[in-house]
Image: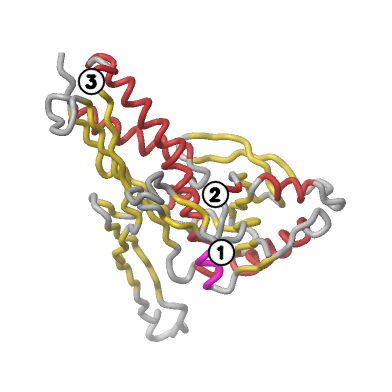
Amino acid sequence: MAINTLEYSKIMMKKLDQHAVHNLTSGWMEANAGQVIYNGGDEVKIPTMSTSGLGNYDRDKGFVQGSISLKYDTYKMTQDRGRTFQIDAMDVNESGFIATSANVIKVFQEENVIPEIDSYRYAMIADIADKAGKKESVNLTADNALSKIREHIRAVQDIIGTDETFIITMPSNVLALIEDSPKIGKSINVADFKQGSINFKVKTIDDNPIRVVPSSRLKTKYDILDGVTSTQEKGGLKPAADAKNINWLLTPQNVPIAISKTDKLRVFSPDVNQKADAWKIDYRKYHDLWITRGKQEQIFSCVSV
């Protein structure tokens, strides 16, 4: 029976987006996109609400009238990325195409798409923190790592309070420095963490969850490769020449708004593909990250000297 490639593509798109959220170390940020309006393409609408402050109550006139402002600002996803793949018709028969194509896209997402989205998001947060004056460059050692991160934690808590949860993002080598601190005591604990529909255990510092991220994804700046020219044909990202290592990012859990959408997944059979006797898979991904006005001073970035 012939494969319904349209229905297959729709099912795969949903599964690919779920797969990305579960496997991105930054996947927790997508929970903040719940009120975002997305109707396809590269634009999203993000709501902003504000209200009047308190006024004096008058015993004769009663309450002072307040105002509520709710507006949707339009943001454009700047990351419009894609690839096309071909699987020769002789390498797979029709009955085996679904398993083969699903495996190709799964490997592609895990090895290329997910690291790129993570890297882009963390670099964006570091850049926003830098522009907001919420960055410090530090040469970390086992003697100063714990005291320095606690200093930065207090700086964030001075703005958001102690009841708000924030996520600490860092590479494993920095966590090792903190754990080697002679003053560590019982500062490191373990807690449950939820990302999408997945629950797992993470370490915490002063009850704030730590997301341990590969150091290759924690640079302050990346060059985005076009995947076309001879020097960039591998595609993806590479650290910029002047990039710094990110020691850690402190980010309130409800602040970064991140979206990644598989906007197109097209599958063409060998009989439809005009270029070759092969199955053809087109993959297009939009993604971006925003921190709205008024929230940009609630984050903190510590980078290498």
Magenta stretch contains residue 203: no
Which residue matches tag 1? 242
Which residue matches tag 3? 89
Which residue type does callout 1 highlight? Answer: Asp
Q: Quadrant of the N terminus?
A: top left
* Disc nearer the start of the sequence (2/3): 3
Q: Quadrant of residue 264?
A: top left
Q: Quadrant of residue 126?
A: bottom right
Write the residue at 59% across / 55% down.
Answer: 166
- Give how far apart the Cα atoms at labels 1 and 2 are: 15 Å
Residue 100 at x, y = what percent? 33, 21
Using the image as rendered, state which of residue 163 and residue 150 is in the foreground. Answer: 150
Secondary structure, magenta segment, majority class: helix
Residue 66 at x, y = what percent? 37, 77
* Residues in magenta, as a range: 126-131
Using the image as rendered, state which of residue 290 and residue 47 is in the foreground. Answer: 290
Q: Quadrant of the C terminus?
A: bottom right
Select label 2 or label 3 by which is in front: 3
- Give how far apart the Cα atoms at labels 2 and 3 are: 36 Å
Which residue matches tag 2? 217
